[in-house]
Image (cartoon, rainbow, N blue to C red):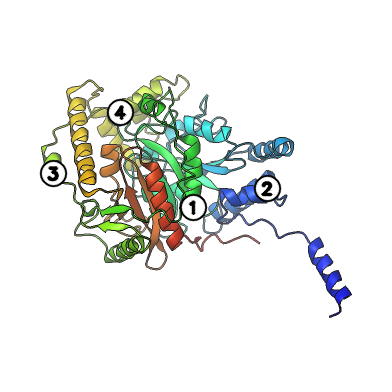
Amino acid sequence: MRLPALTALAAVLAAQPPPPFEVTEATIAQVHAAIQAGRLSCRELVRQYLRRIEAYDRNGPAINSLVVLNPYAEAQAAELDRRYAERGLTGPLHCVPTIVKDNFETLGLQSANGALAFEGYVAREDAHQVKRIKEAGAIVLAKSNMAEWAFSPYETVSSILPGYSRNPYSLRHVTAGSSGGTAAAVAASFGLVGLGTDTGNSIRGPSAHQALAGIRSTMGLTSRAGVFPLNLLADIAGPMARTVEDAARVFQVIVGADPADPVTAAAASRPREDYIAALDPAGLRGARIGILRQAYERPTMSAEVTAVFLKAVEDLRRAGAVIVDPAAVEGLDAIRRAADAGPCMGFHYDLNAFLAARPGAPFRDLKSILASRRFHPNVHARIENAVKSPLNGPESTACQAETRYRDQVRAAVLATMDRLKLDAFAYPTWSNPPRLTGDLNSPHGDNSQFFSPTTGFPAVTVPMGYTRAVLPAGMTLFGRPWSETVLIRLAYAYEQGTRHRRPPASAPPLH
């Protein structure tokens, strides 16, 4: 071909518009780069996610992960586009369409905690973390389905949304709970990131079941204000994302003291950490990681999960980590046997206090909710038992015993980490693959209920591979209090070295 023809061809190619931005598996950094390059507007981004929700959540595979969509999302996106034209990105989460669990109070949107008892309830202000992400430029795109009242770590079914939420990797399997709707929606690329809550499992378990990264913070580093409580001794709210980097970007925004949640007073005196700077692909070099067999070894553990985890441990070693195996927490069995704490605060106490502070709420206390029967039948016994439980406040004998028990567990964990010079513990987030929907007989395999919730120390889960070729499995990194930068560094280095995350086949790109 002659030179003039080549020049003409080049001119034609240069004049062609770039291909449309693909939102499937997109990251915050990719979205911001596309906006800054003029390839994408916030309004178009929101429209693309809404198209995916229509195609895959409500039709097609019917993942059934979302309760309500934000009817103002496109208008809010148009406003962000206007502000961007004036002065650039409006914040670190500029135009980040976010999936928010139904137990976060959210202005203008129903916040029902998965329960018919709160159908139509719209809060007077945003939950603290929702407010923080909005101030950073995010858009709440939808509220996600959840296990009602956040009771179940095993499945996601509520009395607000008919039917179970489905795992997009295998529609016959569960999402785990209670943040299973958020996890399924983020995994299927219905939004960029999500917010979930975790009392015993529910950020980490659903993240593991859907090949996501999830961060459960140190107790007191993130506020729970405006989140329906399950048990404030252990409740945490935080990010779930397709990448460790995106989880860290959300985490950077939501951490810090909040007068509305007294437990965060400890964060006020601590220096502000840079979690983005912790994203080091070489971050495993020289790290000492203990294998916490006490967290996962049981007779019902799946051989498939064992094989995946052993491969993950070798990957940690190859990336430069020093593996300490076993890394047993000494004296733990004796501490647990001697525990004599009765019910301390808990669901009945915490929910009644939450409702008392909300005169606009449709019910005044748990007893009136029980009388209404506006909940799923499978939670009736749990609510009834909670109503019968004693209202032991923080000064009660039971709560004092609970405090002593938790202090003993914390001391034992830290003594082990000091003795073995550990940066973190590692273990499979679940010891078994996701169950079939409706199966309550097979081993569940949840390993998240004890160590992080009891101590209040942080834990991060990261994808570690798959069982049965398609079912995701996650690895937990558990560390000292306030060690989120360490855990994020380790999780990011592992993620970058293995790249286990892949999109679910049930929700491919739309053309």
Q: Residues within 10 Å of mark 2 (few under 14, many from 20)?
A: many
Amino acid carrying mark 4 in the image: His
Q: Which mark is residue 242?
A: 1
Label 1 secondary element: loop
Label 3 secondary element: loop
Q: Residue 436: x percent and y percent?
A: 36, 59
Relative to 347, residue 503 above or below: below
Q: Which residue is label 3 attached to?
A: 331
Q: Which residue is label 4 attached to?
A: 348
Q: Which residue is label 2 attached to?
A: 35
State how many labels appear: 4
Q: Upstream in the sequence, badge 3 or badge 1?
A: 1
- Nearest the viewer among 64 and 485 is 485
Distance between mark 3 and mark 1 Cα atoms? 37 Å
Which image quadrant: the N terminus? bottom right
Distance between mark 2 and mark 4 Cα atoms? 47 Å
Distance between mark 1 and mark 2 Cα atoms? 20 Å
Amino acid carrying mark 2 in the image: Ile
Label 4 secondary element: helix
Residue at 36 percent of width and 31 percent of height:
220
Q: Residues within 10 Å of mark 3 (few under 14, many from 20)?
A: few
Q: Residue 115: x percent and y percent?
A: 42, 36
Relative to 77, residue 39 above or below: below
**Label pair 2/3, CB-CB below 8 angstroms:** no
